[in-house]
Amino acid sequence: MTGYARRVFARRAAWNLAASPFAARAFDRRKRGLPLLDLSESNPTRVGLAAPAAALARALSELARDASLGRYVPDPRGEAGARAAIAAHHATPAAPLHAEQVILSAGTSEGYAHLFRLLADPGDRVHLPRPGYPLFEHLAALEGLAIETYTLRPPASGPRWRIDLDAFEASLDARSRAVLLIHPHNPTGSFLDPQDLAALRSLGREHELALISDEVFAGTGSEAAPPSLLAGAEAGPLHFVLSGASKQLALPQLKLAWILVAGPAAAQGEALARLEFIADAYLSVSPLLARLLPDLLAQQRELARPLLARVAANRARLAALDPAGPATALAAEAGWAAILRVHTALDEEAFALALLERAGVLVQPGFLFDLDAAPGVAQLVLSLLPEPDLFARGLGALLAFAAELA
Ligand SMILES: Cc1ncc(COP(=O)(O)O)c(C=O)c1O
């Protein structure tokens, strides 16, 4: 960093913005037009899933005919019809939800920012899962918050990762304000275990810690959905759920997400009033786009079906890998990602780089998600969204490359 940059920019903006060697090599390969089998693509709009965009086009053309299009009546919590549709989408018999418990945001990341501002002052701590998707620490740091990670332990068998609760409890202090859960988790694909939820709730009540569950990938499992985490939330602590159109409707371009607020009635009311104040300072959600949500959410199952079928087909291909072969996939319950364990003497980054340069296959090395390294094994994160033929060719090239190295 130059002396000027050191003086003029805030410490929290003192990032090293140079691309990592891995990202730079992938970018370079694309720029040079070299063949690339991209098994990291997680943008559903780039993998030929046409139904959501077609439904969006229909909903937009209907909206265009609406006579009230020219009026702007801002509601800081978000358009009432959209909130009612979201509440209906998430409600279960054990955890009813009302439109009043919903706040819209322009993307899930903004939802995180609202919650961090609501719950924590600069220097306070939020507890994040490790491994995890590399976004939340940046969102917390942007609000001046300190980050503490808690460990998710891989299962000896089966798909369910568990929280190291003793270590988590020992890490709590007076500045701990919130704990983040990803349900189902990215990239492990594991749901939060009910016993872990019960323990976190009890610690949350004891330490006045709010729970934030990121449920953007809810509904992506092949098994019956697990019970809503909000069942029983009224006993406390405050519990916020994050979700959005990006993953629920495969429409990231809508930039519409939402926060559900649950917990003891009085605290819930206080939280909602304060969140409304925060949202009112920005009014960032387009009420026009929000008006599309009831129609799109009503079609959610049909819109998600092709994507879920794709994810299931790619997952089945991984599940069928020879256990004695060079790579096996970890069992998972849901989500759009898979973790592949490749037997190799190279470390993860070296393997991923060599795979990219010599076989033209792009995957994400596990350390980007804070997956613990294991000797003799490279853990790779694969997106399950690529078109099945490309996925099969990429996986085949990966296996051949790993076998050749061995
Ligand atoms: C668990 C989780 N939450 C939130 C996000 C951000 O989602 P979006 O910005 O598309 O709403 C991601 C991105 O993949 C994610 O994995």
Image: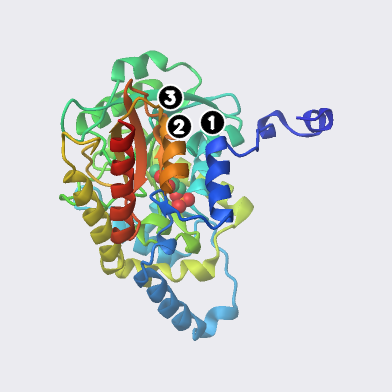
The residue depicted at 16 percent of the width and 36 percent of the height is: 323
- By what rule are the colours in the image chosen? rainbow
| Tag 3 residue | 149
State whether residue 148 is above or below residue 9.
above
Q: Nearer the viewer, residue 251 or 231?
A: 251
Look at label 2 and name its amino acid: Glu
Q: Is mark 2 within 8 Å of ligand 1?
A: no
Give the class, few, some or many, for how many residues have Cα within 10 Å of label 3's Cα (few <14, many ≥20): some
| Tag 2 residue | 349
The residue depicted at 60 percent of the width and 71 percent of the height is: 72
- Label annotation for residue 357: none
- Label annotation for residue 120: 1
In the image, is 217 to the left or to the right of 364? left
Quadrant location of the C terminus?
top left
Describe the element under mark 2 as helix, strand or loop: helix
Disc 2/disc 3 C-alpha distance (Å):
23 Å
Quadrant location of the N terminus?
top right
Q: Position of residue 81 (x, y in %)?
A: 41, 67
The residue depicted at 47 percent of the width and 41 percent of the height is: 270
Q: Nearer the viewer, residue 106 or 198?
A: 106
Look at label 3 and name its amino acid: Thr
Mark 1 vs 2: CB contact within 8 A: no
Describe the element under mark 3 as helix, strand or loop: strand
